[in-house]
Structure formats: structure tokens, C-alpha cells
Image (tube, rainbow, N blue to C red):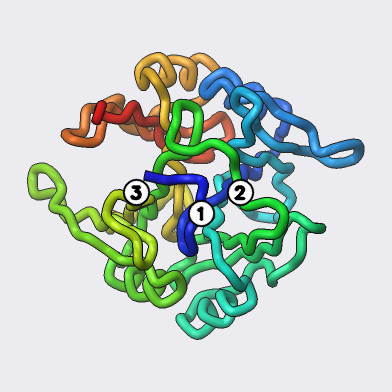
Amino acid sequence: MITTDFAPGSPCMLDLGAPDVPAAASFYGSVLGWDLEPMGEGVEGGMFRKDGKMVAGLGKLTEEGARPAWMIYYTVPDADATTRAVEAGGGTVRVAPMDIEQWGRMAQYSDPLGGQFAVWQPGESKGVDLVDAPGSLCWTELYTSDAAAARRFYGDVFGWRFTDMPMPGGEGTYTMITPAGLPDERMHGGLLEVGEDALSLAGGRPYWHPVFAVADCDAAVAQVRGNGGTVQMGPVDAEGVGRMALCLDPFKADFVLLTPTEG
């Protein structure tokens, strides 16, 4: 589970880059019950809130050639030290560490195979206010072409602990991720080695996507379809996990909806 104490290496924040901010706000408002709090005059974007609590960010996609996508941020005590670890592990710095006023310090990277992720060194802001509840982040997931390489890289950068689990029907291995020094109950994500066809969204590169908890997966999927999104898989029941669906918003940013199994 993800919690808001944001131990080092745990997900703490996420934001969406979209070409049409009002349309994206309308879509996620319908699907997840989010409201957009604008950043201010002259800034396209803002913070998504669920029942008044911050759950994610939204900004105008401006990077040339970039695809609309969610960016997941992981808590680190020192963004500059993490940057050195990323470079030592063969990753690339996309955005060098920079201060976001008094709120914190951030940086963005690509792993050695091209999967994009980010880190947040807390200042006055630790991260989002709501997680592991309907309408909020409850899991993070990496699709990659090389699970062993991903384990080495992210293990070196974040100190993550990995636990392998066989997929149903002998369809491979799912690797679950836990922050260093924490028990299995604090697992916050997973990684899965997939074929080239599953990476087509990112031009063949690995990519992270968020999993959002919802009270009723089927009802949320109906809202996805009814508001210009598409469903790539599901809804399906995953034993011991819940009912889930892999979705794309109207701009093809990917995310998962999950109604967790009770208990």
C-alpha cells in the first residue's frame, strides 16, 4: 500500500502532461471525481483535488515530440545525490535538479532503456494529500523490455527490495517493489517484462503508469468510454488483487483503474 508518510523511495506525487488542459481536467473529473485548482494567471494547469485533497498535478504538454503521459515522482532525501546515482547506473538526466520555490526540489530522468520517472526532495510540500483511497493513486507499475536490467538500475538508485510472483497461467513473472527497510505491507508498485507490442505507446521504450483506486471499476470504465477515452484491457478480475482495467485517456496517456479486493 502507498501511504502519505512518503518514506525514501516511495511514490509521493504524479502529474500529467496533456495537450489540452481543460479537456484533460474534464475527463479525469468525470472518471475519478477530480476538481482542478488552477495554478494562477498565465499558467496552463493546476492541481487535481479529490474532496479538497490534492491527488495529482496537470500541466500543458510543451516538450517537442513528447507523448501525453503521467509522470510519477519518488521521494528522495537528496535529489543531487540521486542524480549522480542515475548517471552512474547508465540513466539520463532529462531535467536537472531544480528548486520549486519553497515547496521542494525535483528532477526528471530516463532509465537506461528509456523509461521516464522523476524524484521529489521535500520542502514545505511532502507530496499529494490522498493515496490508497477511491479516486487516488494506489500503485505504480513499470512495463519494461528487460526486467533484470530494471531491477539492477532502480535497485541501485532507490535501494528498492524486489519480490517475484508468478503470473496466473504461467504468463511470466511479476516483480513487486518495496521501499528499502520496509515490510511487505508497504509494497508500492511492480514491474513486468513485456513484449514489443505492449511498449508501442512509448515507441518501444519502457514506461511507468499509475494505478488509481476506484469504488466501482465497471462504472469508472463506462465513464472512460463515455468521455473520449479507450480501454485496452478489462475490466477483469485478478485473484487477490481486485477488478481492474487498463485505460487510455483521450490523448492516449495510460493508467489503470482498480477496485481492490476487500481485505
What's the residue at 22%, 28% (across, down)?
237
Q: Secondary structure at mark 3?
A: helix
Instruction: Return the residue at label 3.
Output: 198
Up the image or down, 235 lies above or below 171; here it is above
Whole-Å distance between the Cαs marked 2 and 1? 8 Å
Return the disc, 3 or 1, that comes first in the chain's sequence.
Answer: 1
Residue 192 seen in this snapshot: yes
> Residue 174 at what x, y percent from top left?
23, 53
Earlier residue among tags 3 and 2:
2
Element class at badge 1 = loop
The percent position of residue 247, horizontal first and vertical second, equals 43, 32
User: For the residue carrying disc 1, how many other residues have a C-alpha within 10 Å: few (<14), some (14-19), or many (20+)?
Assistant: some
How crowded pointer 2 is (Cα within 10 Å; few <14, some 14-19, many 20+) is rated as many
Instruction: Say which residue appears at 36% left-offset and 44% top-offset.
Output: 1
Q: Nearer the viewer, residue 96 or 135?
A: 135
Identified by mark 2, the residue type is Gly
Q: Circle 1 sits on which residue?
A: 6
The answer for how far apart the CA atoms under marks 3 and 2 are is: 30 Å
Q: Residue at (84%, 41%) from the top-left corner?
A: 43
Q: Which mark is residue 194?
A: none
